[in-house]
Image (cartoon, rainbow, N blue to C red):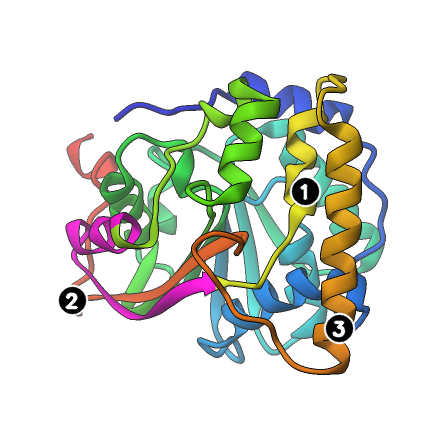
Amino acid sequence: MDALSQNKYWQLGYQRRRSGAEIPDVNDFRNYAARRVVQTVESVGLNGKHVLEVGAGDSNLLLLLATRFPGTARFAGLDYSDAGCELLRDRSRRVGADIEVINADLFQPPKELIGRFEVVYSLGLAEHFSSLGDVLAALTCFLRPGGDLVTIIPNMTGVLGRLVKRWNKEVYDMHNPLGLSAFLAGHADAGLHVLRSGYLCSSNFSVLSSCFGDGRRQGERAYRWLSRLSKALWWYESKAFELPKTAWLSPYIFAVSRLRTLETRQHPITSRS
């Protein structure tokens, strides 16, 4: 299976990042999209469970969840970037979050991780590989029988994908642009039963920030105005009611799924070693 992005890209990104200890306040309307992501992961029920984020380098989401469930759930984060893992360790110490940080490859993990978790989730991971079904099959191997998998990817088939392709083709090419139907077909290929799925949040133009990490300027002014537009819409949604989620404007696609059988699965890589 082909990876559409390389470790070197993520290493450089984490090394450039100046990550503070602060965790986003999801009650602030300016973090409305983050609130919706948090609610999606929490919807499976985290109390008393062992939870794993895969692709967790410097993860705001993992830190936020760990501080929202202190002592009532156990949290771990796995990433193959040692720079990303170091940022996560440092921030978790500074905010007092109890997180086990695992520096390992998703496809060659320590064997003791297989079948260990009741909840596994990823945010912006699965779309970086050419075969969605293979990535999801690898993710499910961390689950205990009856465990839940939450997968969230950027919606690269709508307006966000078109803008990324226009402003930074290199970043666009690191993504497998999946629509909802292809996303669900990948879950079926991995032997998963989707409990619920759909588009998530009405808009979030702030995700376009990845187009400008290398210092390029084309489109940056438009990006800043679009980000302000998203925040204005979030203020309205926080005060009034949620706006529709659409294939054209929604920033994320999500699925909450479960293995079709309750048998413990072997990891497709480690089972051959």
**Upstream in the sequence, badge 2 or badge 1?**
1
Mark number displayed over residue 175: none
From the viewer's side, name the closer residue of 203 and 91.
203
Task: Specify which label sits upstream in the sequence, 3 or 1.
Answer: 1
Residue 183 in the image, given as x and y percentages of width and height = 30, 50
Residue behind mark 2: 260
Q: CA distance from mark 3 to mark 2?
A: 40 Å
State the image coordinates of residue 195 (x, y, percent, origin top left). 29, 73
Q: Is residue 233 above or below residue 250?
A: below
Q: Nearer the viewer, residue 130 or 227?
A: 227
**Do the CB atoms of the residues marked 3 and 1 lie less than 8 Å apart?**
no
Residue 161 vertical position relative to residue 154 in the rendered view, above or below? above
What residue is shown at x 68% (from left), y 60% (from top)?
Answer: 98
Residue 3 coordinates in the image, percent (x, y): 37, 25
Secondary element at tag 1:
loop
Q: Which residues are magenta?
A: 182-199
Q: Nearer the viewer, mark 3 or mark 2?
A: 3
Q: Position of residue 137 (x, y in %)?
A: 25, 47
Q: Answer with the quarter of the image where residue 15 lies.
A: top right
Of marks 3 and 2, which one's residue comes earlier in the chain?
3
Residue 167 is one of the magenta-drawn residues: no
- Visible residue check, residue 90: yes
The quadrant of the image that shows the N terminus is top left
Q: Is residue 177 left or right of residue 32?
A: left
Separation of disc 2 and disc 1 at Cα?
Answer: 32 Å
Q: CA distance from mark 3 to mark 1?
A: 30 Å
- Hey, which quadrant is residue 262 in on the image? bottom left
Check disc 3 and report the residue beneath it.
Answer: 236
Q: Helix, strand or loop at disc 2?
A: loop
Residue marked by disc 1: 58
In the image, what residue type sits under mark 3?
A: Tyr
- Residue drawn at point x = 81 percent, y = 39 percent: 19
